[in-house]
Image: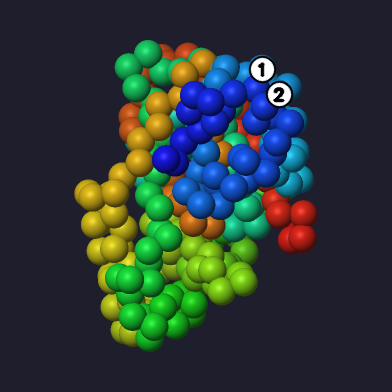
Amino acid sequence: MSSLTGKESSRHLKTEPPNLMKTIDSAGYAHVKVPISYDEFESLSRQLGAIVYRTDLHITDGRKSVVYKSEEIGFHMDNPNVHIIGWYCVRQDESDGSSMLVDTCDIERYLSPSEMAILQTIDLKCPHPLLHDPDAGKEAFFLTPLLSWKHSVPQIYFADWLLLDSYDEKQANALDKFKDYLRQKQERGLITVRLKEKEGLFINNRRLLHGRGQIGRNSSRLIRRVWITDPQDKW
Ligand SMILES: [Fe+2]
């Protein structure tokens, strides 16, 4: 079972963070269904690692990032230095607002070792969390490979709109295969979580891609997001 429900997500969870981490480690994500306050959510988040960034996600006129707009958000990963993303629902969209997740845990079954090796050479742009500021017309990117390894576990970083303009033939072929894999996963293994007020969702950002369908133009949806790093990693 991939979400913490009923007994699993009862109040004892907050005093036993290993249960939450275990769920994230095994399923790739954890849906905290017991209503909690934002302070409780932060305290859970801190037990998973270091909170390095907080963002309130809601429709905001004049802001350029898609996270402040009502339109659909395609599948992607956030900053590759973020181990876990946490979302806390203050208000959900009236019609939907679900988070859609794709788990890449079985990528090695779909791509050959040689294709996996090529993915390690495919760089994507990553917006610098402090210097990149589209609202001020400032662009600042660094490059990160689509695939790297940590303790023999694949670490994926992907967003279609952050690919470079061109890749060589071998890279383009491996990229096509990776995109096919994502399409198949979306068709056959899509995970949908519609957070209710006061619920939380944590995902492993290097394993699961996330996206969101279109929400109402005047939606009052408000999700508070935290970026959590592995204390052993540098931010
Ligand atoms: Fe995101």
**Local SS, label 1:** loop
Looking at the rendering, in which quadrant would you find the N terminus? top left
- Residue 154: image location, x then y, percent: 51, 68
Closer to the camera in the image, 127 or 233: 233
Report how many numbered discs are placed on residues in the image: 2
**Local SS, label 2:** helix
Task: Count neighbours of disc 2 (C-alpha within 10 A) and say few if under 14, some if 14 to 19, many if 20 or more.
Answer: few
Q: Residue at x 61, y 70 (%)?
A: 150
Q: Is residue 230 above or below residue 37?
A: below
Closer to the camera in the image, 172 or 148: 148
Check disc 1 and give the amino acid type: Ser
Residue identifier under label 2: 40
**Quarter of the rendering containing residue 36:** top right
Q: Residue at x 37, y 63 (%)?
A: 106
Check disc 2 and give the amino acid type: Glu
- Residue 231: image location, x then y, percent: 77, 54
- Residue 233: image location, x then y, percent: 74, 61
On residue 220, the disc is: none
Q: Residue at x 25, y 64 (%)?
A: 180
- Residue 100: image location, x then y, percent: 38, 39
On residue 37, the disc is: 1
Marks 2/1: CA–CA distance: 5 Å
Q: Residue at x 38, y 72 (%)?
A: 108
